[in-house]
Every structure is written in structure tokens, then in C-alpha cells.
């Protein structure tokens, strides 16, 4: 809303009172002092079991701060909104629900009126949550902590960690691009605020990641470290900005999301950080244990240098096979990593499911109020 004429039916002291106000988009507010309160009259009103009814007669033409609202000759979108908060001399944020008309209409004509569809907005939100809370979080875990797990096992000719990482990140890319196209189809114009600006940066980073991966240098190429750092930085920055963008979406009027959704997002961030911390500790223990094993192996190899000459060809071959098998074994604590991955996967699915339900069923208060 912004620079719109509103008619307020407000329950006060057990009765319904009528006010007229002009809305402001920044900050969101409804100002009564700028509108002639005699421009509308309350004909009938009631409040039963929390449901407000009011019948209002408004002047056909109302002038407010140089603007003319001509309800007889002009066409306007109608917006029905409801909320629970009242401010001094104003209504508060409409946290229960908002339903705009699908197209502007003339109030001088009797006609059927339908609300605008929220399908594209719901799909946009659901796709972005699935991508940046779900598949990206899991894809980063695979790439960072599972390169030495499922060693020797491959899918489509690629190591397991890489196969899963690629699948998850391609899913992220596909969902993000689809969600961005859907919101452009819905809005049909650029709308700039914190959510859209940070979201655009996230989409650009996401779009560039797989393109950069196509030009990945070989493992022994001297440019490979630069690629590794760039790919790591781009992916993690996109993930962080993607989550921040979802936080900003909670305040958007079109999203109709409850403010307490912030606490669910905070809970996810805490769980995600704790999982990374546990995996990182395990990674440090791996390096420490492998380092100790390497030192012992160095000492044994020095001793074996003198013994190999005395061994038969069969014995030497068996020793080399043993060392090769050791290199194909998973790094220490593989069972712990797999178990934690399973728990994290289940928790992640729960977070994604709850958040998507909040988006699809928004405003969720209408369902909670009926229970």
C-alpha cells in the first residue's frame, strides 16, 4: 500500500468505529489526520466472536492532500486487510491477512470480484527456500567434509561426494532461476528494497558458479588453487546472502509471513553452524590422526628399506598391495560423519517443510485462528 484511501472498521471498547486514513508505503502507516473524517459514514456495524462487520457509505469524490479519489468515474484495486494491532490514532500492521482484487474496478458497477492469485509468489518462496535452506546447505556439507568418505565408491564415474554435490547444486541453480523468472512474471517491473537487491546479487552469484566450474583447471594445474578459493568464496557468499534474503522476505507485505518465522530461520542457522562445527572438529581429528600415522609410516619405511632386499618378490608385492588398500580406505571417523549427515538431513527436511508450509499457507494466522 502507499498513497491509498482507506476505510477503517476498528473495534474499540466493545463497539466498531469508523475512520478514514491515507496510507504511506515508507514507513508503512495509515494517517487519519490528513483525511476529512466526514467523508464516510458508518451505517451498520457489529462484532461477533471476533468477526467484524460494517456497512459504510463514502462520498463519491474525496480530496486528500492534492489527490482526488473519484469512486464514480475512476478504477481502483480493492484491498481487504485485517490485523490485530492498534497504534495511537492509527491501525497497525495487517498481520492476519490481505487480499487484493485481481484487477482495478469501477465501484459504480455491480460485478463479480475475485482476489488476485498468489500462486507465483508462493512458488517463488517455496523454490527459494528449498534451494537455499535445503539443497545448498547439504551440497556444501558434501563438498567440505566428505571427500575422504565412501573412498573407492563412485556414481556415474565420479566420487560419491562430487556426484551428490553436483546434483544438489544443479538443483539449487534450477530452482533459483525458476523462482527468479516467476517473481518477474508476477511483478512485471523492478521493485527495489533490501530483499530484491540482495536477492539479485545471490542469483548472479548462483548463475556464475556452474559456469566457472565448467572451466575448472586440472588437479595439477598451477591455477587450480585460485579456482578452489574462488569457487569456495562464491558458493559460501551466495549461501549466506540467500539466507539473509529469506530473512528480509518476512517483512514483505506481499509475502504475508508471520514475524515469528524469523525464529525458525534463526534456529536453522544455529543448527547449521553447530553441524559445521562438529564436522570441522572431526576434520581436525582426521588430520591429526593421519599425520600421526604418516610419521609412523615414515619410520617403518626406513626400516623396510633394509628389509625389502631380503624379501621375496611375492612378499614385496603383498606389502605394496597392503599400502594401496590403505590409501583406498575411508578417513577415520567415517561412521560418525555418515551418522551426523543422516541426522542433519532429516532435520533439514523438517526445516524446509515447515518454512514452505508457512509460505504456501500464508497468512498462517487464518488457520491458527480456526483451530
Image (spheres, helix red, strand yellow):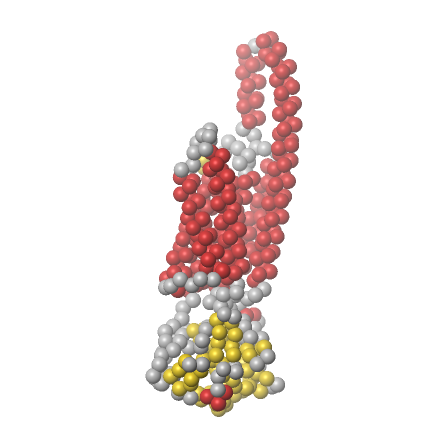
Figure disc tally = 0
Residue 177, above or below 79: above
For the point 52% across and 88% down, the residue is 45
For the point 34% across and 83% down, the residue is 73
For the point 45% across and 30% down, the residue is 221
**Is residue 370 something one can see in this rendering?**
no
Q: Which quadrant would the C terminus be assigned to in this image? A: bottom right
Left or right: 4 as drawn, with respect to 15 = left
Question: Residue 94 at x, y = what percent?
Answer: 52, 73
Question: Residue 123 at x, y = what percent?
Answer: 43, 60
Question: Residue 137 at x, y = what percent?
Answer: 53, 48
Left or right: 287 as drawn, with respect to 6 = right
Residue 238, above or below 225: below
Residue 187, above or below 152: below
Question: Residue 300 at x, y = what percent?
Answer: 64, 18
Give 275 or 241, whichever is nearer the viewer. 241
Give 317 or 191, whichever is nearer the viewer. 191
**Is residue 201 something one can see in this rendering?**
yes
Q: Quadrant of residue 87?
A: bottom right
Give 328 or 144, whichever is nearer the viewer. 144
Q: Quadrant of residue 186?
A: bottom left
Residue occupying the far bottom of the picture: 43
For the point 43% across and 34% down, the residue is 217
Residue occupying the far top of the picture: 310
Give 363 or 223, whichever is nearer the viewer. 223
Amino acid at each position: 500500500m502507499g498513497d491509498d484511501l482507506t476505510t477503517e472498521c476498528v473495534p474499540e471498547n466493545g463497539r466498531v468505529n469508523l475512520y478514514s486514513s491515507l496510507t504511506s508505503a515508507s514507513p508503512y502507516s495509515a494517517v487519519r489526520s490528513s483525511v476529512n473524517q466526514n467523508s464516510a459514514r458508518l451505517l451498520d456495524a457489529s462484532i461477533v466472536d471476533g468477526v467484524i462487520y460494517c456497512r459504510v457509505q463514502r462520498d463519491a469524490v474525496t480530496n486528500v492532500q492534492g489527490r482526488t479519489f473519484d469512486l464514480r468515474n475512476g478504477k481502483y484495486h480493492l484491498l481487504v486487510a485485517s490485523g490485530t494491532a492498534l497504534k495511537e490514532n492509527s491501525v497497525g500492521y495487517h498481520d492476519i491477512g490481505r487480499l487484493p482484487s485481481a484487477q482495478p474496478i469501477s465501484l459504480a458497477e455491480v460485478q463479480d470480484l475475485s482476489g488476485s492469485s498468489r500462486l507465483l509468489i508462493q512458488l517463488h518462496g517455496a523454490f527459494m527456500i528449498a534451494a537455499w535452506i535445503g539443497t545448498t546447505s547439504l551440497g556444501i556439507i558434501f563438498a567440505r567434509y566428505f571427500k575422504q568418505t565412501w573412498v573407492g565408491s563412485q556414481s556415474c564415474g565420479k566420487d560419491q561426494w562430487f556426484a551428490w554435490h553436483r546434483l544438489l547444486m544443479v538443483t539449487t541453480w534450477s530452482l533459483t532461476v525458476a523462482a527468479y523468472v516467476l517473481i518477474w512474471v508476477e511483478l512485471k517491473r523492478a521493485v527495489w528494497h533490501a530483499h530484491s537487491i540482495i536477492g539479485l546479487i545471490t542469483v548472479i552469484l548462483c548463475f556464475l558458479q556452474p559456469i566457472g566450474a565448467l572451466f575448472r583447471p586440472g588437479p595439477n594445474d598451477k591455477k587450480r588453487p585460485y579456482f578452489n578459493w574462488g569457487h569456495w568464496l562464491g558458493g559460501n557468499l551466495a549461501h549466506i546472502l540467500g539466507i539473509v534474503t529469506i530473512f528480509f522476505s518476512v517483512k514483505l507485505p506481499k509475502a504475508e509471513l508471520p514475524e515469528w518465522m524469523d525464529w525458525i530461520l534463526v534456529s536453522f542457522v544455529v543448527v547449521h553452524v553447530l553441524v559445521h562445527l562438529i564436522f570441522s572438529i572431526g576434520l581436525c581429528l582426521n588430520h591429526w590422526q593421519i599425520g600421526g600415522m604418516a610419521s609412523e609410516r615414515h619410520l617403518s619405511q626406513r626400516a623396510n628399506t633394509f628389509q625389502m632386499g631380503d624379501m621375496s618378490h611375492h612378499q614385496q608385492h603383498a606389502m605394496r598391495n597392503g599400502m594401496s588398500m590403505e590409501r583406498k580406505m575411508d578417513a577415520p571417523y567415517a561412521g560418525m560423519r555418515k551418522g551426523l549427515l543422516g541426522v542433519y538431513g532429516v532435520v533439514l527436511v523438517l526445516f524446509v517443510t515447515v518454512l514452505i508450509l508457512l509460505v504456501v499457507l500464508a497468512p498462517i494466522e487464518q488457520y491458527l485462528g480456526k483451530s
